[in-house]
Amino acid sequence: MSRENVEAVRAIYAEWGRGNFRTGSELYDEHVVLVLRPGFADPGVYLGREEIRAYMRGFLVGWAEAAIAGEEFLDAGDTVLVAVHQHATGSGSGAPVEMRYWQAWTFRGGAVIRIESIKERSEALEAAGLRE
């Protein structure tokens, strides 16, 4: 199942990289958890599909031409680690912004139960039970 999870996450980031953020939520378990560690905008824990959708709507409102692309995908069993490249243009300022970080997507029974945003590769590997 882990190979299928990697391909599912890869397909989500292909769409997110084109600015289509509606894709992917169909894989979320109804009790999915989004964790944004300190250092991210609006850090905290978001529980369930509706809280995650509300967070994304609020996040996207300030940006034009936003894209979140996956650059590397690591299979860690029930977890898929993704090296993320996020870039956007401020809707009011026109200023370009970009950020690189990691996300850990954890699956259970084909559904996403947890997504965690992590700043450093070493911390992402540790979160997935891997070592460099």
Image (tube, rainbow, N blue to C red):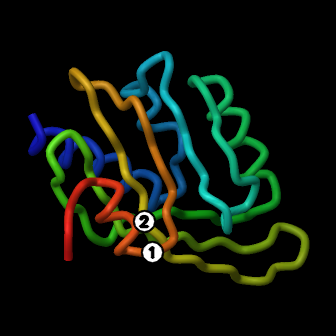
Mark before the other along the chain sequence, 2 or 1: 2
- As drawn, the residue found furthest toward the top would be 30
- In front here: 68 or 35? 35
Q: Residue at x 53, y 37 (%)?
A: 22
Side (left or right) of 77 relative to 83: left
Q: Position of residue 5 (x, y in %)?
A: 20, 40
Write the residue at 50% across / 76% down: 100
Residue 90: x and y, percent? 79, 72
Residue sitting at x 42%, y 27%: 28
Dot 1 lies on which element? loop
The residue depicted at 42 percent of the width and 57 percent of the height is 103
Left or right, 31 with reference to 2: right
Viewport quadrant of the C terminus: bottom left
Residue 120 tag number:
1
Q: Residue furthest right?
A: 92
Q: List the residue tagged with mark 2.
A: 102
Pinpoint residue 69: horizontal percent, then vertical percent. Answer: 42, 65
Q: To which quarter of the image does residue 35 belong?
A: top right
Left or right: 68 as drawn, with respect to 52: left
Q: Quadrant of residue 86?
A: bottom right
* CB within 8 Å, label 2 to label 1: yes
Amino acid type at circle 2 is Trp
Q: Quadrant of the N terminus?
A: top left
Q: Which mark is residue 18?
A: none
Q: Residue 73 location in percent, x, y?
A: 24, 62
The relative height of residue 116 versus residue 1 in the rendered view (above or below) is: below
Helix, strand or loop at label 2? It is: strand
Q: Is residue 34 above or below residue 25?
A: below
* Vertical relation: 29 (above or below) 127: above
